[in-house]
Amino acid sequence: PNRVYLRYRSVIRIGYLAKRILAEGGTAGVLGRTSQGVYLSTPSRWVVFCSWNRFCSPMTVILDGKGDDLERVDVGMRAHLEVNKISIPDANIVWNLDRSLEWLPSEALEDTLAIGDCVGRLDSLRCTVLRIKGNGVEITGAASPWDQDSDRLGDALSQHLGAGEGLTPSGDDFVTGFLLAVNRYKASIWLKGNLDSLNHQIVAEAYLKTTRLSANLIEMATWGESDERLLNAVDYVLGAEHALENVAADLSGWGHSSGIAGLAGLEVAIGNTLRS
């Protein structure tokens, strides 16, 4: 009989939400594949990202090194989820979680800079990102008049949902950056209006208007959580002692435009506070 050789690989880190989802078990479908990893659509509403990249998020599974096993995975394949492993039979793959470490998002800063100092850091981050990305890249939105009335702001943000291409359109990344900033630092950035109402409106509309993955990221942003690249950027602007060059480089390398669009959302959130 023909022998089937399974390709085993260890998982080194797993986001707390992904760990919880895997513990529930079930069968997932491969939703998409990029140069960084594969997206699994689970039986719950959540999408789990299995990646060799070093950056984590609540929904990410970090594999040990870049192997060729990801290239064997195609959209539509089935993945079996268990508390200690992910297996994709059609690709002869098993990813083992026995030695994985659980990743949790960092806590928000207790003491933040004055808003004027935040603007100075934001300008430095913006300029550094643009220098790294090169000519032809723009970060736009901060100059636009945004009203913090939750109803009108919700309508304005809603217009960005689903705008763009891919699993996370740039319009969604913009909304994610905005919501992450105002929810993670509501005492410093959100000054008036009903934030809970805004969060509820945008999350509900996201699950109707855009991709499941984007809706997941937007929902997490309302918890003050995200991919650690965007978390580090928001924390840096508010006063964290991160190295500017590292934050900018990580943000610049996030997807085709995810980092840039997320930064634009942060810029609008800061700009909104200044105008208030």
Image (spheres, rainbow, N blue to C red):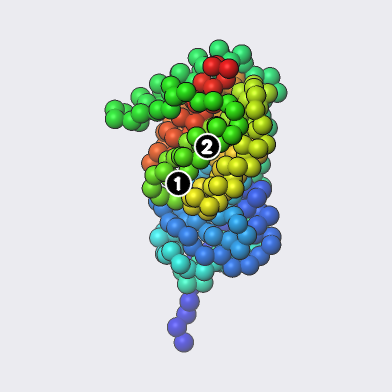
Q: Residue at x 56, y 36 (%)?
A: 154
Residue at the disc numbered 1: 162
Q: Quadrant of residue 182?
A: top right
The x, y position of residue 206, in whole percent, is: 54, 47
Q: Residue at x 52, y 28 (%)?
A: 266
Q: CA distance from mark 2 to mark 1?
A: 14 Å
The x, y position of residue 66, in whole percent, is: 45, 52
Horizontal side of residue 105 vs 34, given as left or right: right
The x, y position of residue 26, in whole percent, is: 63, 67
In the rendered image, the residue lying farthest to the left is 135
Nearer to me, 165 or 86: 165
Q: Is residue 62 visible?
A: no
Nearer to me, 54 or 234: 234
Q: Residue at x 51, y 47 (%)?
A: 214
Marks 2/1 in contact by CB < 8 Å: the verdict is: no
Rendered view: 46 above or below 142: below
Residue at the disc numbered 2: 155
What is the count of numbered marks? 2
Going by the numbered disc 1, the residue's amino acid type is Gly
